[in-house]
Image: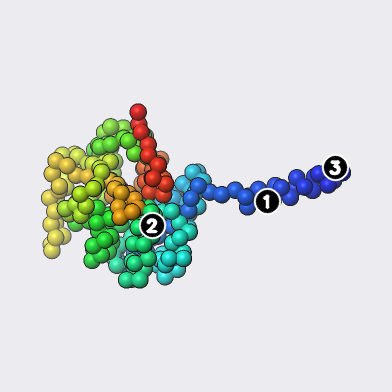
Amino acid sequence: MKLRLLSLSFLALLAAPAMRAEQFSALLFSKTAGWHHDSINTGVIAIQALGKLHDFNVFWTEDANRVFNDKELAKYKVVIFLCTTGDVLNDQQQAAFEKFIKNGGGFVGIHSASDTEYEWPWYTKMVGRMFHIHPVVQTATMKVEDYNFPGMDRFAKRFLFTEEWYEFGPPQSQALKYLLSVDEKTYKPAANWGTKQGKGMGDFHPTSWYQNYDGGRAFYTAMGHLPATYLDANFIHHIYGGIYWAATGNEFHAE
C-alpha cells in the first residue's frame, strides 16, 4: 500500500510541470535588414529571464517565415520587436501581423523598432513615431511623464540615463500617451550625418509611449541601445510593464 502511494505521488510530481501554464506567450522577434545592434543578444537573454521571473513563455526567432502567419501568431498574446531594423516582413507576413493586432494582440517595440518598415503606414502608425537621427551616446536626465502604467513604479521623477538618444519625426498617431521623456538641456542633441541633420526635438522629447491601436495595444520605448542597459533592473522592469500591458491590457495605478 505504501509503495503504491509513493508511486502515485511520484507520478503526480512528474505530471505537475505539464499541468502548469504560464500567464501568456510572447513572440520575441529580432530580425535586422539594416543596422544590427550588439545589444540584441543581451536583450534576448534579459527578456527570456523576465519570462522566468514573471511566468510567461518567450519564443525567440529571427525567421519571419516561421512565425508570421495566422497559425503561428495565434499562439501568442504579444509580439516584441527587439532592435529590428529595415524591411523585415513581406506583404503576406505584414497582413498576418495586422490581423493579429486587429484580433486583440499586443505589440512591444524596443529601440530601433522605430527604424523598421518605414514604407508600411499601418506599422508606422502603430509604433507612433519613427526614428530620424541620433547624436553620439551621452548621459542625460530623463523625466517620468506618467507613473500610471505597468513598469513605471521604480523610476525616480527625474533620473540619469546613458543612451543613444533618438530624435523622432512627427507623430504618426494622435492617440499616443507618453511615459518618459529626456531633457535636451542636459546633453548635446545636435547630429549631422551629411545627408541628414538633427538639432533635437525641443522642450518635449518623448522616449516612451503607448496606445490602443486597431483593436490591439502598442507600447514603445526608445531605450535599449547599449548591451549593458539590459542589466539595468529599472529598465528591464519598464520593458516587462510594456509586455504585460500589451499582452493583457491590465492597468496599473501608482496611487
Three-letter code, disc 3: Lys
Q: Secondary structure at mark 3?
A: helix
Horizontal side of residue 13 vs 98, given as left or right: right
Residue 41 visible, this angle = no
Frontmost residue, 70 versus 206: 70
Pointer 2 and pointer 1: residues touching (CB < 8 Å)?
no
Specify the color scheme.
rainbow
Q: Secondary structure at mark 1?
A: helix
Assess whether mark 2 and mark 3 are in contact (beta carbons under 8 angstroms): no
Locate residue 241: give its quadrant: top left
Q: Quadrant of the C terminus?
A: top left
Crowd band around label 2 with a 10 angstrom C-alpha radius: few (<14), some (14–19), many (20+): few
Query: What type is the residue that disc 1 sits on?
Result: Ala
Between 144 and 13, the one lying in front of the other is: 13
From the image, tell me which residue sits under label 2: 103
The residue that appears at 19% across and 52% down in the rendered structure is 171
The location of residue 217, given as percent across then percent down, is 34, 50
Residue pictured at 30% horizontal, 55% vertical: 214
Q: Is residue 149 left or right of residue 145?
A: right
Q: Sequence-wise, which precedes: disc 3 or disc 1?
A: 3
Q: CA distance from mark 3 to mark 1?
A: 20 Å
- Mark 3 vs mark 2: which is more N-terminal? 3
Q: Nearer the viewer, mark 3 or mark 2?
A: 2
The image position of residue 211, as x and y in percent, is: 29, 48
Q: Mark 1, residues whose alpha carbon is within 10 Å: few (<14), some, or many (≥20)?
A: few
Query: Which mark is drawn over residue 15?
Result: 1
Percent coordinates x, y for residue 4 in the rendering: 83, 47
Residue matched to label 3: 2
Instruction: Determine the secondary structure under disc 2.
Output: loop
Q: Which amino acid type corresponds to the residue marked 2 in the rendered image? A: Asn
Find residue 224 and report its horizontal and vertical position in percent.
33, 50
